[in-house]
Image (cartoon, coloured by chain):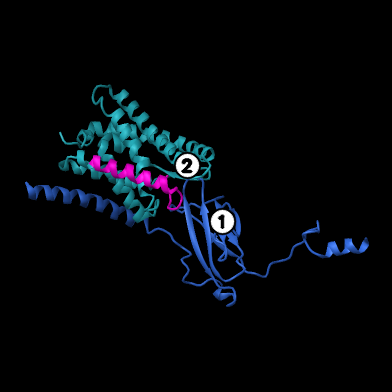
Amino acid sequence: MFFSVFMAAMTGSAFAHGVGYSLSELPALSLEFTYSDGAPMAYAEAKVYSPTDEKIAFQSGRTDEKGRFAFTPDSDGDWKVVVADDEGHKVQVPVPYTLSGGEDSALSPTVPLSSRPAGKFVGSVAGVSVLFNIAAATLLYRRKRA
Amino acid sequence: MHVSDGVLSPQILAAGWAVTVAGSAIGLKKLNPDRVVPVAVFSSTFFLASLVHITIGPSSTHLTLAALTGLALGWSAFPALLVALFLQSIFFQFGGLAALGPNCMNVAVPAVLIGLCFRRAKGEYSPLRYSVRAFIAGALGVLLTSLMVSVELGLSDYGLVKTAKILFLTHLPVAVIEGIITAVVVDFLRRVAPDLLMGVEKV
């Protein structure tokens, strides 16, 4: 009797009710999500997909108040982080990850880990200019035909 | 309220594109090419209005001024908004390109409806009533758009009630703000540049 209880306790968490913790040796990866106006995507739903399973999320949670979300990849390959809020904004970040190459190569520098829109001023001027050019071209075309 | 790519279901995407293409075709057909400058003016206004951000709680939203576009351009609001949204997507990464169809539908349908309902009685009202009508039009535009986005997200498995509640609540203050802006702008244009409100259709 004593022996079987002892064995149960030894076989790990499935039987044990006690929980413990230790500092993970694996480096965590933290991403920051923002709206195009720079505001953080606070408390947005975040899902991480491992290289081996594209259907079931490896981790699911929410970004923090500042739009940050961290996860701990435990294998090499193409990871994917998808963050979406309740209003139809969604962003998908591919994260090619190499664990074995040491700390520096944990994140390859070519990863598109930042995609922020171009300057607003330039965009505004360019956009309005396109619109009025369309109008001008239409009027010019009309004149020529007349 | 620019919906990103990969959010809406394929059916909604298809429906959005169908409505947008049809609406834009009608808008272009009705458009008098000599009146293309007002179209560019309101298209630009809409294009830039999205940069005016209003932060309410955790939600980030912005002006649309779609109702103003509808009041001024009628059916031609469709192509005007389509081009402006395309440019927003290119220059500001607002909304996905695949979702451009539904995104355009979401602002252009309310714009055209408001144009049809509120444009008729030009000059028949006192300035005050004219402004009140413009206020209602502006506010209604925002609410109709948020309703359409809610329904689409709901039909795309996004939890309709929750989304609708959030979108509606956060856009209530925006509706009031847009109502005021629409009223002020319409009143200003009526006095200063009535030409811009004359419509752009072929006669």
The residue beneath circle 1 is A47
Split into 4 quadrants, where in the image is the N terminus of chain B? top left
In this view, B157 is above or below A16: above
Q: Are there few (<14), some (14-19), or many (20+) residues within 10 Å of tag 1?
A: many
Supply the letter of whichever chain is cyan.
B
In the rendered image of the structure, the colour used to display chain A is blue
Residue B132's quadrant in the figure? top left
Q: Which residues are magenta?
A: B1-27
Question: Is any part of residue B39 visible from this angle?
Answer: yes
* Towards the viewer: B102 or B46: B102
Discs 1/2, front: 2
Residue shown at the point (8%, 49%) measured from the top left: A145
* Towards the viewer: B198 or A38: B198
Q: Secondary structure at mark 1?
A: strand
The Cα–Cα distance between marks 1 and 2, rounded to whole angstroms, is 21 Å
In the image, residue B22 lies in the stretch drawn in magenta: yes
